[in-house]
Each structure stands twice: as C-alpha cells, then as structure tokens.
Amino acid sequence: MGAMSKMRNSTPVVLWVLIFSFGVLWVLQDTQMFDAMAGGPTDLGSVNGEPISLEEFNNRVSYYIDQYNQQNSGPMEAGIRSEFEEQAWEDLVSEQVMSQKMEDLGILVTDEELVNMVTGENPDPFIRQQFQDEQGQIDRVALRAAIEAPENQEVWVMIEQQLRQNRQQQKLSNFITSGMRVPSREVEEAYRKENSFADIRFIRIPYSTVSDGEIQVTDQEIRSYYDDHLDSFHREESYRFQYVHFPKTPTREDTLRAVQEVEQLSERFEATENHAEFLQQIQSAVPYRDGFVEVDQIREEYSPVLDLEPGEVSDLHMISGHPHLFKLVERQGDEVKFAVLSYRVVPDPIATVDRLAEEADEFAYFAREDGFPEEAENQGYELRNGSATQATPVVPELGRARELVNRLEQMTRGEISDPIELRDAFVVVRMDQIIAAGPRPLEEVRAQIENSLREIKRKELTVTRLREQISGQQSLEEIAQTLGSEVQTAENIRLGSNTLANAGREPGIIGAAFGLSEGQRSDVLSGNAAAFILEVVERDLADPAEMTREDANRLRQQLEQEKYFVYSSVWLEELKKNARIRDNRALFLSR
C-alpha cells in the first residue's frame, strides 16, 4: 500500500492526536518548559570538561573537504564525508588532550617568546619566508608595516595562534625525546645491520608438504589453546542487525545524460590543441598523458584510436558502461599519442539519489508501523543479515561504512533506523542484538584455533621429519638429492633485511645465517612458510669501529625518531583512554 493511501486511511486518528498535541504544547509553552529543554548540550563534546565546539568541528571538516576537492574531480561520495567527520573528531580530541597535558607539564609559550618569534633577531621560519629581502635579511620596515596595518589584525591573530602552537609542539617533542637517549650499543647494532652482508646456499621445504590428513587436533588441545590465549579473542562491542539495501544504481536516464554530455563536447575536443588543459577543465575521468605509446601496447578497448587520422575524433564508445571519445593526436611509426574523453555514469543527485532516499524513508516509516520483515516482504525488498564491530569502519558485504557503525553505536535492540547513506547505497537497519565487549565464545573461534594448531603441528612435523631424513648427511647436494629438492643461492643479503630472494619474508632465517661461520651448515630451521637448511658461502660482518661520526649521528637520529614515533603514539592513546571524553555528536549530526 502506498504512503499517501495509508496516511489517508489513518486521518481521523492523526487529527485527534494533533489537536491534543497542540493543546499540550500551548500549556507547556506557558510553563517555559521549552526553555528548560533547550538547556541540553550546546557543544559537540568535551575533553575533561573543556568543550569542543560545533563550529571548530565544522571548520575542520570543511578544510578536509576543500583539500579533497582540490585533488579530485566529480561529486564527493557520502561515505567520504563521514570519514572526514570521524577524522576531524579524533583530531580535535587528540589536540585537546595534548594541549591539556602540555599545560600540566608547564609547557607553555610566553608572550615574550611569541614577540621574539615575530620581531626578534632570529624570527620563526614562517616570518623569515614572508619578509626576507633579496640579500636574505628580514625587511624590518615591511614587517613593521604589516604588523601595524589595521586590516591585518585578524590575520595576525591567526598567525600568532599558529606560531604559539608550533612552538609548544616543538617543546613537547623536545621534552619527550630528552628521555629517549639512544645508547651507543643500539647505534652500533644498527650499523652492523646496515653494513653486514652474506652469500648463502639453502634448501627450502614448504610446510604444505605435510597434508591435513597427517595432522590430528583434539578438543582438549583446542580448549587449552583457547584458555591460554584468551586475550587474543577479545572483541569490542558488536552488533547483529537486519537491513534493506537501496543501491545507488545509475538509471537509463543517467546513462543517457552522460552520453549526451560527452557527445556535446566532441567538436570542442576535436578543435582543442591543449589536450591536458581541456580534459582537466571539463573534468574528464581519464586524464591526458602526453607521451607516445607503442601500437601493440594499447589496451583492446582503446583500439578504436588506431583507426583514426591525426586530429580526428572517434564515434562514441561505451566501455564498462561509461561513454568514451578517442582522439588521435600524433602518429610516429609504430607509436601513437592520443587523448581520451570520458565521463563516468553516476546517479543523478536529484532525480535518482533523492528519489531513492524517499523510497528508503518511506520503507523505514512503514517498517516501524507494520514490522520490519513484513514491510520488506510487502514492498518486495530483500531482507539481509549484517554484523558490525564498534569503532571498526568496515562492515561485511557493505565495505567501508563508518556512518552505519556510528549509528549502530547509538541504537537500542529492536530499533529501526532512518535511512543511512553510504557511498553507493542507502540502508535501513533494525538492531537485533548488541553483544557486549569481551572474549568471543569458544564455538565462534573453534575453527580459527583448529587452523592455528594445524599450522603449528605442520611446522613441527616438517622439521622433525627433515631431521630424521638428513641424519648423517653433510653436504647440501646430498640432502637435496635425498629430499628430491634443489639447492638455491642468495647473494648480498643484508643483516637488517627481512626478505630472502625466492623465499619471501624470512627475517629469522636471515638472522640465523649471520650466526653461522663461513662454510658452516645449519640444522633444520623453522621459517615463516617453510623449513630451511642453509650454508654460509661468504660473510662480511661490519665493524662498528669503522663507523664514521656522520654515520653515527645519522643512525642515532633515525633511532630517536623511530622511538619518538612509537612512544608518542602509545602516549597519546593512553592520554585519550584516561580522559573524560563526552561525545554529543549523535545529537548534532544525526541524519
């Protein structure tokens, strides 16, 4: 039954409800109850009582969107805006906790410091860049004029804020790194890893040579593994829900519109001489690449360009559902230079997307009235089952869906959402189950544990068998013949490398090679994906005594930066974890 028909049938009830509601509203207005209700949250959130305003949040989101639009053509998908909103919130929270911590530590920038950063003998690099003359000196007259100009007052307020923040961040960085001195032994070890090399020969036996039928895993082993690794199976709050999917599929009219737009540009495309500028100006989906391509290297779908004369534009071709025009720019022997004009067929934001949003909204309305599965069946929509995890933006079957996860975090069991716009669809969901954070039940992870145990046993069995098979044999050639394998070589292996040629990521095997003497053969070694037997042909271990002062300073700085990055990331997460963060986004940003 259509929406208008259902509303007409329920008019008498709606009328009396409205009459009663207006009477109640009149009374409540006289009691000033709305004034009290209006006293709800006025900020988007807070960190330890310090507010995060909706204005600064919107400004941050707008900045991200502007940066995106400068680098991309075409309309921005709904899901991208949601990701920007999430990023803006996380950035503002991080900045707030960092600012508060710096204040607690007494890391401040005085007004005197700020003045010196602008007008002192050694001003901030930003000031130097803006007011430096041809001799590399600060133009003090121009700087003073810019400071005193009334029209620059607001600009200077912004500059001072940024300079103060930059200096404060630098002080914090110095504070953290002051406690991260890198010992000389770590510098020496980094030098050894960077400058030690070896040539090796090896035999590699993949673990896959042991079949599943040769491995047995008992229930007791699964239970013991689960109990010993309980923390590994922890999950955040998760949700199970049903949903109806409204895909943003371009209509026939959308395709026809894109075709017409491309056809209308054909004459201009043929007349233009600056192909890069023209295609960028009209926002073609395929940018111009100013270079020759060998004829036999041209993609099959682009082959119509080979039938053209220089300067000629082809008829319209549909490739993967999108219209294309080709223009042969120049031909040189067996090479051609060409341009492609194409528009992607996308749903019209009004005729298609708005109509789809109305359909989803109508479904949500009547699903609340008549029941979620019942209304899906009545309207012929497929009912799907979904699951999601708190703070995890990827949802199975739906891909990146941050806005959906954010909405699920606010819902209660049995609640039906308004339409939620994703990148390529609208969804309406009904919350069926909210699963509290904690260890996943054993039955949910049984298959995962069994696979892990099988891999452990597969490795152990491979190594044990190899040791039995090679007992008493000395040369790699003898061992390879016994195993039906081959001897491989790898040269110039760096001690600090993680990858072994023709063997993949094997840092443990590389480390073991440098623990052997030249000519020495190893025992059977357990790698990531295979067992190894190796022999060192030549080894050159670097001597830290040969390290230059420049090498030492470079390596020390590199290690300090690595430590700073790891520590500051963990430190920030701990600050956020211990902060009182109030998040009112659901009240301000609900759609």
Image (cartoon, grey):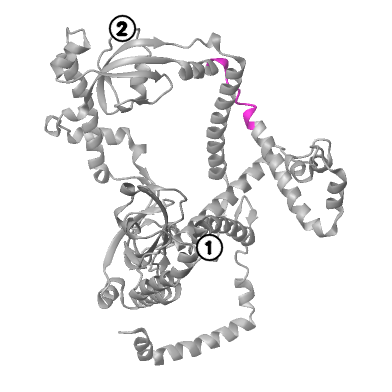
Seen at 72% across and 38% down, the residue is 106
Circle number at residue 281: 1
Residue at 33% in and 50% down: 298
Question: Mark 1, residues whose alpha carbon is within 10 Å: few (<14), some, or many (≥20)?
Answer: few
Report the front residue among 301 and 267: 267
Residue plotted at (36% across, 84% down): 3
Secondary structure mostly taken by the magenta-highlighted segment of the chain: loop
Which residue type carries mark 2?
Gly
Q: Quick one: label 2, few (<14), some, or many (20+) residues within 10 Å? A: some
Viewer can see residue 576 = yes
Q: Quadrant of residue 458?
A: top left
Task: Give how far across and how far down residue 350 sits, in percent.
Answer: 45, 75
Instruction: Locate residue 2: give its quadrant.
Output: bottom left
Residue 108 position within the rendered picture, expressed as x and y whole percent measured from the top left = 74, 40
Q: Is residue 462 left or right of residue 517?
A: left
- Magenta stretch: residue 421 in it? no
Mark 1 residue type: Gln
- Magenta residues, start to end: 176-185
Q: Quadrant of the N terminus?
A: bottom left
Could you tell whether 470 is left or right of 240 in the image?
Answer: left
Numbered disc 2: secondary structure: loop
- The quarter of the picture where residue 60 lies is bottom right
Q: Where residue 372 is drawn, which disc sits there?
A: none
Q: CA distance from mark 1 to mark 2?
A: 66 Å
- Circle 2 sits on which residue? 519
Q: Position of residue 180 (x, y in %)?
A: 60, 26
Camera-nearest residue between 353 and 97: 353
In the rendered view, would you say 300 is above or below 426?
above
- Circles 1 and 2: CB distance less than 8 Å? no
